[in-house]
Amino acid sequence: MRKTILALLLCSMLFASFAAYAGELSLGDVNEYLNTSAKLGEGSKANQVAVIPFDHIDGPKEEDLFYAFVPFKYVARSYIKYQCTFISCTCRSADVNVWSTAYVELTLPSSGKIEDAAVRTISFDADSTGHYLGGFWGDSNPPPTAPTRTFDVFKADWLPYYTNKTCGELMGYTTIDDISDAPFDIDAWTGATVSCNNVLRMLQAMFTYHATDSFFDGDARAVELRQVFETKRETVAASAAAAVAAGEVALPAPVDTTKTYKANKDDTVETPCAEGNFGPTCSAINSENLRQYLGRTDVKYIDLRDYSDYAKKHLRNFECIPYFALIFNANAHTDAALPQLYGGSVTEPVPVYAESDELLEALFPRNQILFLMCQSGGRVSQLMTLLKARGWDMTKVYNIGGMAQYAGAEYRDIVTDTPEITISATYTFEGLTRIAP
């Protein structure tokens, strides 16, 4: 029973850490995680995942740059299997505006040119083998303004038009109004133009993404489409970041220079706080105002205490990275029995391993805003001094104090308090190259 409780606890810690980390990821970080750390790469659970830009038709004569998802990609001998999840019509009410998933197979032509790549299969239900439901029709059935255009009619009359159509052909269309070779009356689909147009736009987005595959390396047109893909993706990411930032309180500088502190306990005059004061007393963010800075997408929240203290009481969604156990011990560079990354002093830390800086970067990313806490703020001050010595930008690192300062009622709903749990942990590193004696 004790082992079961401990296992559940460790699982919950890992999940909480991941949940906290997931909240701060950019689209690029998501792709990096899913295609590497999550083992969704070639030959594993599934193939790579992507967020792709999508020129979405919102309504008659209305469109905007939106996004779609590719949750599945599998490279076959002469074609690539994809799933693409996209929203068909934003004019519907939110309670019925579910997303569609298209199963699409695009060829890898012998010419090596993206313009010659063609639609091998497009489906909103079964895949090309008929054994799997690779797609899902998330659109209205039938469209309210075209009651005769049911999904069955759509599948029988509209989708077959795209089979064998090449990238060169489909990229030349703006909307279905441009289609002149359809074996049916385009006007009959006027009431379903949003659905029809977004299938066309989805295929165009998929061909643009298809061009990023290494198969098309060296093809000039593929290079053009890759540039379009990256430019649009950066635009979507920037818009998303701006939308998130608009709802967040602006972060102050880490040190509040309006504060003062006693440099020595016997001082009669207090010293003004200045940049480089890493203690919690001078911090601009503390127990009085932390609440308004929680849950941000641009911040990594870290608790530096050992797992035993963390398990008993911690702020939810803070990741536990034990400072004394893993990061620093003054004797670590001279005592091979000590596992820490650095020895010496925090002002002049001595790397213990060839990979010490690499691991420090993985645990405390240089390009991330860091909110650090411990029991009283002392360990944070030490780590900040160490990070500065290793070249970190200290305008992004905050000492938010210690768990002892977050006992107020305003934090009670986000504190996990489990004093009954005890943990005995052994901290080690594996596979590192020790360079210190």
Image (cartoon, helix red, strand yellow):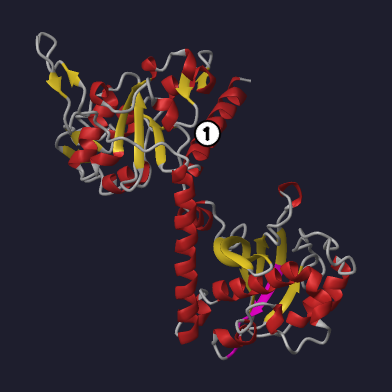
Q: Residue furthest right?
A: 148
Is residue 129 visible in the rendered image? The answer is no
Q: Is residue 403 above or below residue 184?
A: above
Q: Which residue lies at the image location 29% right of the left edge and 40% below the top edge?
A: 396
| Quarter location, residue 251 | top left
Across and down, in percent, residue 406 comes to 41, 17
Left or right for 101, reference 307: right
- For label 1, the crowd category at 10 Å Cα-Cα, with few meaning under 14, some 14 to 19 and many 20 or more, is some
Q: Is residue 281 left or right of residue 219?
A: left
Q: Tell me: residue 395, above or below residue 181.
A: above
Residue that label 1 marks: 16
Residue 86 x/y as whole percent: 66, 61
Residue 309 in view (yes/no): yes
Quadrant of the rendered structure where residue 264 is? top left
Give, as a three-letter code, the residue at label 1. Answer: Ala
Range drawn in magenta: 103-110
Q: Position of residue 365 (x, y in %)?
A: 34, 45
Residue ID at (27%, 27%): 283
Pick the front one: 314 or 336: 314
The secondary structure that most of the magenta stretch takes on is: strand
**In the picture, which quadrant includes the N terminus?**
top right
270, above or below 69, in the image: above
341 drawn magenta: no
